[in-house]
Amino acid sequence: MQDIADKLGLSKGTVSLVLSGKARGSRVSEETCRKVRQTAEEMNYQPNEIARSLSTGKSMSIGVIVTDISNEFFGNLTFHIQEQAKKYGYTVITTNTNESLEEFNDAVTNLLNKQIDGIIFVPVVGGEKVAEKIIKRHLPVVQVDRYFPDMKASYIIVDNYKVSAEITELLIKKGNRRIAVVCYDIDLNALRERRQGYIDTMNRYGLLDTTLIKDINYEDQEEQIKQAIIDLKNNPDKVDAIFFCSRRVFITGVKHMHREGIKIPEDMEVLCFDKIDSFSIANIPIHYIEQPIGEMGKKAVDILIEQINGANDIKQYVLDAEIKHSI
């Protein structure tokens, strides 16, 4: 900035006003602003972000921690977070945990060391103490998709129980009686509520058969989902439909259904908790639950920025998801 000021015969303060976007409303003329910006471009000026953060007390960056960036849901969620953060002038540093407590701890530690202004994160099983490190730093934080019930922090989630109960009832009203559920055996409220919505609805209609509940271990999911499909195919009482509690379980499950020669929907109907873009070209009639991913990402950023700017209130949103049909 000093080099630009010397070249134009201006004060460093004037150059700083222009390059920081604060010249509007000051006594700096439009012509001077134009010359400063042009000279900055000619001299390949780049702002010193470290110096700027020391001056403003803000790094203008936020951290985002998701569990599986390869999952379409989390990829889309991260996209919407980044797009909304841009509107506030913030950059996003994204990290991935693979549902691992150790990797969650590493992600939080690394982001805190980078002096980011706030964190949006997807909780990992057993991660309460790790998340408390953020709270103890008095750093703005928002939980998304899941939440730690005992943690005093903002969150944005979907009403997993309600929509899972509704889609199970939809199948029952279509005449299905033998409905299975395939779900990760992970102790997180989102998955527990999806599973429980199914269980309570089946119970209410007197149709619950616990042998049709297939709990899948995350680490060994490929083999366990394959075995679950084989078991359901060979069940002595014909299974009418399968409710897959997450996108990845659904994709793997349908793959093994095809390999086992199970026709959809002639042999079994399928439900998926999430939209998959390939639905539109697969030409298979599938009921699925569409989550408001865009709204979740935008709200998470809005709440975080409010906290960065000094708001102290905790905001907790439970959004509705919609039942859709692929054809």
Image (cartoon, rainbow, N blue to C red):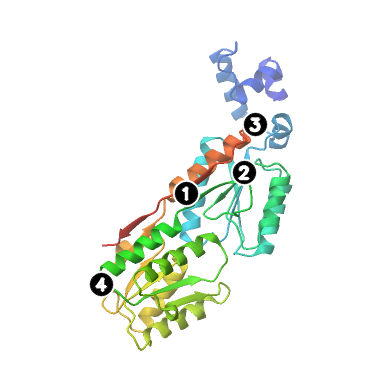
Residue lying at 31% horizontally and 58% vertically, measured from the top left: 324
Q: Nearer the viewer, mark 4 or mark 2?
A: 4
Q: Label for residue 45?
A: 3
Judging depth in this view, the residue of 208 and 38 nearest the camera is 208
Q: Which residue is mark 1?
A: 318
The secondary structure type at the circle numbered 1 is strand
Image quarter of the C terminus: bottom left
**Which amino acid type is shown beneath numbered disc 4?**
Gly
The secondary structure type at the circle numbered 4 is loop
Q: Nearer the viewer, mark 2 or mark 1?
A: 1
Q: Label for residue 175?
A: 4
Q: Which residue is mark 2?
A: 62
Task: Name which of mark 4 and mark 2 comes first in the sequence.
Answer: 2
**Which amino acid type is shown beneath numbered disc 1?**
Val
Task: Name which of mark 2 and mark 1 comes first in the sequence.
Answer: 2
Mark 3 and mark 1 in contact (Cβ < 8 Å)?
no
Image quarter of the N terminus: top right
User: In this view of the protein, can residue 99 be seen by the observer?
Assistant: yes
